[in-house]
Image (cartoon, rainbow, N blue to C red):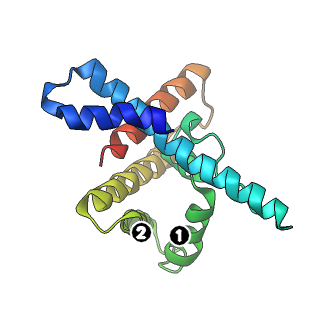
């Protein structure tokens, strides 16, 4: 994780205005995997330490970067934190039981609070809001989608779009 993070750190030291587009994307992808390997590594260590102490802790990551939607991404990324926010923020706000508009407001509020949980800075609020909007767009898309079947090409395209969106959001 740290080796990948060095590329991102180098880019931020150089100054973003003097970095080529391909190098900027390479740095962003490196940062994306640094975040993943850091969190996944911590989670694996916690699982191992838990086993040593006789506890069975829940899985926390399930290959989130192969997700085909933001909904799937959040079911795979930081599973325990997502479950906590669902149980203690989203559902108490009314979840999806209070109508469509309220569902989207609850999703957005939950993700903004998730951003604030990560840090008390506007960049984290933007990150949470972007993820909340993406979740709302996905739910809205699925509501009006005619065919529930997905093709291989459609799944690949959806996966690429989701991955690029997640990468860009990490910038914040």
Residue that appears at 62% across and 57% down: 79
Question: Which callout, 1 or 2, points at the residue further toward the start of the chain?
Answer: 1
Q: Position of residue 85 (x, y in %)?
A: 53, 69
Residue positioned 63% across, 32% down in the render: 149
Q: Does residue 24 sit above or below 148 in this rendering?
A: above
Q: Is residue 76 visible?
A: no
Q: How many marks?
A: 2
Q: Residues within 10 Å of mark 2 (few under 14, many from 20)?
A: few
User: Is 21 placed left or right of 111 in the picture?
Assistant: left
Callout 1: SS = helix
Q: Which mark is residue 135?
A: none
- In this view, the residue farthest toward the bottom is 92
The reply to whether the C-beta atoms of the residues labelled 1 and 2 are less than 8 Å apart is yes
Residue linked to disc 2: 117
Residue 131 versus residue 18 in the image, above or below: below
Residue pushed farthest right? 54
Instruction: Say which residue appears at 71% left-offset and 55% top-offset.
Output: 59
Q: Which residue is mark 1?
A: 85
Q: Position of residue 53 (x, y in %)?
A: 82, 67
The kind of secondary structure element at disc 2 is helix
Answer with left or right where residue 54 lies relative to residue 30: right
Left or right of residue 50, residue 163 in this image? left
Vertical placement of residue 145 versus 106, above or below: above
Label 1 packing within 10 angstroms: few (<14), some (14-19), many (20+): some
């Amino acid at each position: 994780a740290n080796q990948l993070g060095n590329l991102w750190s180098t880019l931020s030291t150089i100054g973003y205005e003097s970095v080529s587009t391909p190098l900027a994307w390479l740095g962003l992808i490196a940062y994306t995997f640094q975040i993943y390997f850091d969190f996944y590594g911590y989670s694996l260590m916690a699982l191992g330490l838990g086993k040593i102490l006789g506890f069975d802790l829940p899985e926390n990551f399930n290959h989130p970067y192969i997700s085909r939607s933001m909904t799937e991404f959040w079911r795979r990324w930081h599973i325990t934190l997502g479950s906590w926010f669902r149980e203690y923020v989203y559902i108490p706000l009314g979840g999806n039981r209070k109508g469509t508009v309220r569902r989207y407001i609850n999703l957005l509020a939950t993700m903004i609070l998730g951003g604030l949980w990560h840090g008390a800075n506007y960049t984290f609020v933007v990150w949470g809001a972007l993820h909340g909007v993406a979740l709302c767009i996905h739910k809205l898309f699925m509501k009006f989608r005619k065919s529930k079947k997905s093709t291989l090409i459609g799944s690949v395209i959806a996966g690429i779009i989701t991955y690029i969106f997640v990468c860009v959001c990490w910038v914040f």
